[in-house]
Image (cartoon, grey):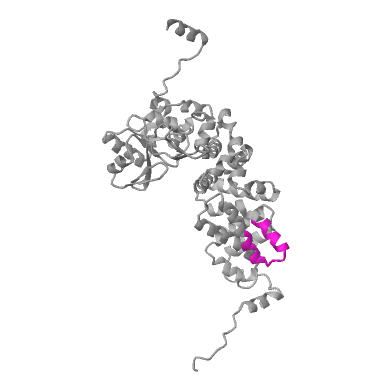
Amino acid sequence: MIRKLISRVFSGKKPAANRHEPAVIPVSSHGITRDRISSGSRRTCETLQQHGYKAYVVGGAVRDLLIGAEPKDFDVATDATPEQVRHCFRRSRIIGRRFQIVHVMMGQETIEVTTFRGALDANTKKDEHGRVLHDNVFGTQAEDAARRDFTANALYYDPATEAVLDYHHGVGDLKAKTLRMIGEPRARYREDPVRMLRAVRLAAKLGLQIDPEARKPIRDMADLLENVPPARLFDEMLKLLTSGFSVKCLTQLRDEGLHHGLLPLLDVILEQPMGEKFVMLALANTDDRVRRGKGTSPSFLFATLLWHEVLAHWEKLLAEGQLKIPALYQAMDHVLDVQGEKLAITRRITGDIKELWALQPRFEQRAGKRPYALLEQPRFRAAYDFLVLRAQAGEIDMEIADWWTRFQNVEGDKRGEMLLPEQPGDKKKRRRRKKKPAAGPSASE
């Protein structure tokens, strides 16, 4: 033993830390006081601790506070089972299949409470590629920390003591601006391929460099995303697009070779100069809104990502001699059907996307009563914003967007003065659309 100790000292190697014992970092070192934790998460931890359970604010909230960012959500981890958590809170419910969690309602907040997860073993249900399918196995806090994806997410904050428990050197990695995987990266990506997307999103959002050992396998393992349920991919894509750093995320997705397996048509869009300019303008606009605390629309985001594929297919159908509007609807259905095979875009969002696209040709009509009717459309404002992006990207003449900007900001006679003269064919088209009275006996007969 003495010989080993002397050898270790002279070799300069540090003794291996006990992986089951976390580093306990006091508030004097990390600076996170309990008043910076949401009242709902603080009360949730206090209630569970009063019932004799361990309870901590965990993961992203702790990570964000350490780097000076404002957390979006405050999640809680505990050694209480979902049923035990539910019995501690009158307003709570158990959700989830793959791994059960409890939603605890605290005033206006909904706190997501998870039970410490246990280590995977030979009995863990997986698919043929190694993806974990069923995971309601509970364990110790140390096992829970080891199951988390990145060291920066394996951090536990105790509101009672204001201490941070760090099992995997996550605080040190954050200081070093490194996103490091817990465990062997290839095995962790097989367990959950979405971790590859999460690595890209977190690195872009937090300004971190992906550790080379975690980055190296991503391009080779991108095909595993094909086995992820479309609903999970849609949720992760939405998080990426609304992160406030979507331009950086999208660029890094392409650099890592992940865009082919995520949005099948995205790589085609980004290879078109006009398409890439349009997409990047839309994402930059979304990033700006997120950073200013304004709302974002999933419908608008996906409409911008896919618009140039709709345009390409629409032009192809027009070249084949199809009518303008029926061809547009056929192109919309085609593009959304292709995406539906990979991303489970909800029916409501799909409907909104199609409405945004369908309104675009109507902006070309600036004569007669049609501009007034378009102003009354419920989706006018979103469709107008879409039109402005198209003009900024050089797809259409900026004069059209400027006209609609002025038209909606004036009233009465001034609007009428702006209308363009009707073309000779416009009145004939309207007459053709009027329904002829049905032939048959009159009411008196």
**Residue at 55% from the left image edge and 31% from the top image edge:** 214
Q: Is residue 136 above or below residue 434?
A: above
The x, y position of residue 432, in whole percent, is: 64, 78
Magenta span includes 316: yes
Q: Quadrant of the N terminus?
A: top left
From the viewer's side, name the closer residue of 381 and 315: 315
From the viewer's side, name the closer residue of 236 and 407: 236
The x, y position of residue 179, in whole percent, is: 53, 31
Q: Is residue 316 left or right of residue 159?
A: right
Q: Quadrant of residue 245?
A: top right
Q: Quadrant of residue 246?
A: top right
Q: Quadrant of residue 417?
A: bottom right
Instruction: Return the residue found at the far bottom.
Output: 445
The x, y position of residue 121, in whole percent, is: 43, 32
Q: Is residue 380 left or right of residue 432?
A: left
**Residue at 40% from the left image edge and 35% from the top image edge:** 58
**Magenta-highlighted residues:** 310-331
Can the viewer see residue 373 in this picture? Answer: yes
The x, y position of residue 436, in whole percent, is: 60, 83
Magenta span includes 68: no
